[in-house]
Image: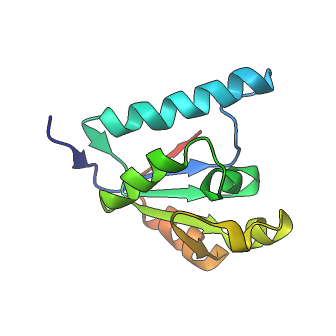
Amino acid sequence: MEQVKADGKVLVVSSDIMGDGDIELGGILIRSFFHTLLESEILPNSIIFFNTGVKLVAGGSPVLEDLKFLEQKNIDILACGTCLGHFNLKDKISVGHISNMYEISETMLKAGNIINL
């Protein structure tokens, strides 16, 4: 299967779980989502992590290996520096790069489509 990046698609991840409600289920869903994304024919151009979503790019994250594979497919992974600092994770980032609100807002404004998890 050939994977292609969808022009202008940006995935925004604002939480380390998927959905509202049960935290355990949300953790299972976020792991399943990123693992499934690896097998998808269409990939986003960028993935932006902010708020508790930045926990997913730090060491020990349950989706770290999946995110590393996505980064190898030239998907730009941005992690909010303010958020990383808030959670004391700046020195634990293991995938992507530390970003700021200028880059995050510019990436979102240039996006053809934004998909919020």
Examine the image and state in which quarter residue 36 appears.
Answer: top left
- Residue 63: x and y, percent? 55, 43
Q: Nearer the viewer, residue 89 or 42?
A: 89
Q: Residue at x 56, y 58 (%)?
A: 48
Image height of 67 relative to 83, above or below: above
Place of residue 9 in the rendered image (x, y in percent of width and height, measured from the top left): 38, 51
- Identify the colour scheme used: rainbow
- Quarter of the picture holding the C terminus: top right
The image shows a total of numbered marks equal to 0
Q: Residue at x 15, y 34 (%)?
A: 1
Q: Taking 23 as reference, is 113 left or right?
A: left
**Horizontal relation, residue 2 to residue 92: left or right:** left
Q: Nearer the viewer, residue 54 or 63?
A: 63
* x and y, in percent, of residue 79 in the image: 61, 65
Q: Residue furthest left?
A: 2
Placement of 117 over or under 55, stated as above or below: above
Q: Quadrant of residue 22?
A: top right
Left of 71 or right of it: where is 40? Answer: left
The correct choice, above or below, for 73 with respect to 84 in the image is: above
* Residue 112 seen in render: no
49 left or right of 112 in image: right
* Residue 93 in sight: yes
Q: Is residue 15 above or below residue 88?
A: above
Residue at image x 31%, y 33%? Answer: 39
Residue furthest front in the image? 60
